[in-house]
Every structure is written in C-alpha cells, then in structure tokens.
Image (cartoon, rainbow, N blue to C red):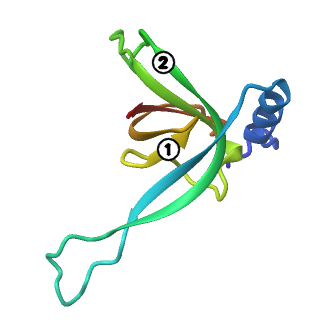
Amino acid sequence: MPDLFGLDIADLVADGIAGAGGLVPGVLTHYSLAARDPLDPTAERARVPSSHDFDGFVERLTSTRRAGSSVFEAGEYVSILGATISPAIVPSPGDEIVIEGTTYTVEALADRDPAAALYVLKVTT
C-alpha cells in the first residue's frame, strides 16, 4: 500500500475502523490469466484463482452517485479495508467475494481513495 506523507494511511484507517467494531471477515478470490500455451497460441487462457482474506462490510444502497457524474445508481456494494487484504492485491472486475455467507461477483471498482485504505466494489450475487 502507498505511503502518504511518510504514513501508512491504509493501516491507520484499518486500525481505527477495526477498533470501533462492525467489520466482517471475508474472502476475495482474485483471478489472473495463466500463461499462453506456445503450442496452441489461440487457445483460451485458463483463469488461475488466488484467495485473499480481508475485513469489510456490505452496503445495499437505494441510490448513490456514479463516479464522475450526476447519475445515481442503486445496488449492492462491498467495501474492503485495503490494509486488511492478505496477501495484498487490488480487487478487480470478475473477482469473487464471500462475506456474511453470500457470494458476490465484482462488477466494478466504484471508488478507491489515494491511500488504498478503502476499496468500494459494485457487486452482484
């Protein structure tokens, strides 16, 4: 995670929010593409999963402002504290999240602060 002003902002935010309670443990399954087969270069590349524990929370919003616009978009969002993702990774569309007994698929990274302290992910079930 990036340091800003010589401080690990993401760790400070995670510690502060964790101390207040209300976070839920979850598992992020990140998918990357396997190496291309040199004997069959046009073959589809396999998706390789990796598991990452995190602390976060689920929000069900009736309306929110779409990034960079005045358009409101309702839906389900999972917010993940960046410093709690272990091993560290940046969530991306197509990843899967299991939190509070529900499996979600990441549609989009809705918001992220410059310190990577909080990732807000638009998800579907």
Rendered location of residue 113, percent (x, y)? 59, 31
Rendered location of residue 49, percent (x, y)? 45, 63
Q: What residue is shown at x 52% (from left), y 31% (from top)?
A: 78
93 is higher (above) or lower (below) than 109:
below
The quarter of the picture where the C terminus appears is top left
Q: Which mark is residue 97?
A: 1
Q: What residue is shown at x 82% (from left), y 36% (from top)?
A: 15
111 is higher (above) or lower (below) than 7:
above
Label 1 environment density (alpha carbons within 10 Å; few <14, some 14–19, many ≥20): many
Residue 15 left/right relative to 33: right
Residue type, numbered disc 2: Arg
Return the residue at label 2.
60
Label 2 environment density (alpha carbons within 10 Å; few <14, some 14–19, many ≥20): few
Residue type, numbered disc 1: Ile
Q: Are marks 2 and 1 in contact (CB under 8 Å)?
A: no
Q: Which mark is residue 14?
A: none
- Cα gap from disc 2 to disc 1, whole angstroms: 15 Å
